[in-house]
Amino acid sequence: AASMVESDAEDAESRPLLSGKRSPHDRSSVGSSSYTDSHAASTAVDVAHEKAKASEDRALAQFLRYLGIAAGCLVCIFVLAAVGIVLWSARKQVTELYLEREPPPCAFLDWSDWSACSATCGVGKQRSERSFTSSRKDFPDICSPKPKPPALHRDKKCELRDCGGKDCVIGPWSSWAPEPCSEPCGPGEQSRKRDVLVRPDSTGTPCPVLVQHAFCQVQPCSKVCHLTAWTSWSRCSTSCGPGRMARTRSEVLRVGDALCPHLTETAPCHTKPCPARCYFDLAPSILHAVVETVNMCNGTHSGHGCHFKCHDGYTPEAPLVCVQGIFEIADCLPTMCHVAPAVSHAEHLDACRHYPSGSSCRLVCSVGFRKTGDLFCDNGEFSNETCVETSCLTPPLIAHSTGNETGSLDSCRGLGKGQSCKGFECHDGYMQTEELICRGLNFNHPRCNEAFCPTSPPQVNNSIAAADQCVALANAGLPIPSRTACALACAAGFRKTGDVVCLRGAWLAARCVWEGDACWRSPEGCGDRCVGEEAPEVSGGQPPACMNMSSGQTCELTCVDGRRKTGDLLCAGGAWEEGEGP
């Protein structure tokens, strides 16, 4: 039975191969193969996903990098813009500060049109204005000298119409009696008149008849006087308004003392009305005008102009013109300096054109020259200012200079540019750093420094010359500065009292003294020494705590707060020397 079961199992295992079905073993094999393929596919998908993710990460990183670069560029742009704004503002402020210290000249702009009359009737005023600007277009408000208001506007009187007419006012008639008859005999004429108290204006009531005529006869004329007929009337004495015309006749026969009538006869005439004259009881008020010359314009004919005068510095704008009994008022304007002056070595003179009288134009001279004053416009002409070559007026005070005591530097006042002062000399032991020269407005600043020692230090007895460090400098032709201490080396058995010191061009020698000399056992030593108690009082310094020092040694000087030292105290030849700056 067991063998049959095994046989059946074997048949069952082999049967699927014959029937087209796979055995469990085959399914396992196929499943294993499918799993392998599925795993491979899954792995490929994961790799693809990782690559895609890596690509996305790289793209994101690149985007973030570009975004960071763009943000950095924007920050740089904003920073550069802010720096540019700050620099521009600083430049503008610096330029403005400079211009406030050295402002450019001002220049006038053109006059504006006349304004409307300020009064609708009667006398009013019209105004024209102008402004000024700087020669620097970027700073139009900064200039000097700024014109004052009188130079920035001008006024003139105007009258559109009369506010109310002024009627004629006349006085009473004179009597007939004072006037003699026009004829000594026969019929004649007698007249009387009345005066005008107030003259009318162009809109007032005109004056009535001012003269009346009447018949008169003194006595009859003689019959033995024969005359010719009257001539024709002459031309009227005036071209307009009331006048007189005349005619004459001659005697033909006259016997004895016969009385004859008059031979000449006049009569009033009036060809045409005259334009109204301009009369005034009170002269027109014109600022800066000479009143006497305005009064002479009273009675000017209509259509005519009357010239008047202005005070110095002013010019009439136009004559007073009479128009239908009313004056057109003119003004006295400041006399202008229209032409720029010619000044040698000056700059920006074109800005001085069209300046009114009484104003000043700033004179700017070239480098190396100074002005004698600003240009003042007076009555149409500028003052005669010039640009002169700059000179040095006050020489400086130079320490250790003989000129401070003798006054020799006073002769250097007024030197021109490039000239040197011959009176500049230093005290003995001091030398000039340079000449005293006028550099333009001011002198340079030379000094009197302590003189160098031009020769080698002197030979000291019992010293070793080869050990002297200053000899080599002297042999090379190099000067040795003042306050230099040259170490002194003494021969065996000798001691030095100090070092050799160069002080203000002279050598202060030390000595080589025998060691067994009694002076070494004394408190003072063998001389050429400086004691601290003998140190000089220095202004602004603490008392020096200097011990017993030999020649060539220095003692440090301490200054109080707010002071600095020019050098330390130097022991030279047994005496203290205060510090001296280079």
Image (cartoon, grey):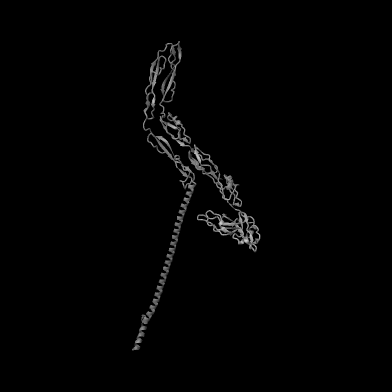
Q: Residue furthest left?
A: 1
- Quadrant housing residue 520: bottom right
Based on the displayed image, in which of its 4 quarters is residue 47 positioned?
bottom left
Residue positioned 48% across, 49% down in the render:
97
Residue 571 % position (x, y): 59, 57
Total of numbered circles in the picture? Answer: 0
Q: Position of residue 562 (x, y in %)?
A: 50, 54
Percent position of residue 50, x then y: 42, 70
Task: Determine whether 482 is above or below 185 in the image.
Answer: below
Towards the viewer: 76 or 4: 76
Q: In the rendered view of the protein, which quadrant contains the N terminus?
A: bottom left
Residue at 46% from the left image edge and 13% from the top image edge: 252
Q: Is residue 285 above or below residue 551?
A: above
Across and down, in percent, residue 67 comes to 43, 61
For the C terminus, the quadrant is bottom right
Residue 50 visible in image? yes
Residue 23 visible, this orientation: no
Q: Nearer the viewer, residue 424 or 136?
A: 424
Give the left or right position of residue 8, taking residue 333 as reference.
left
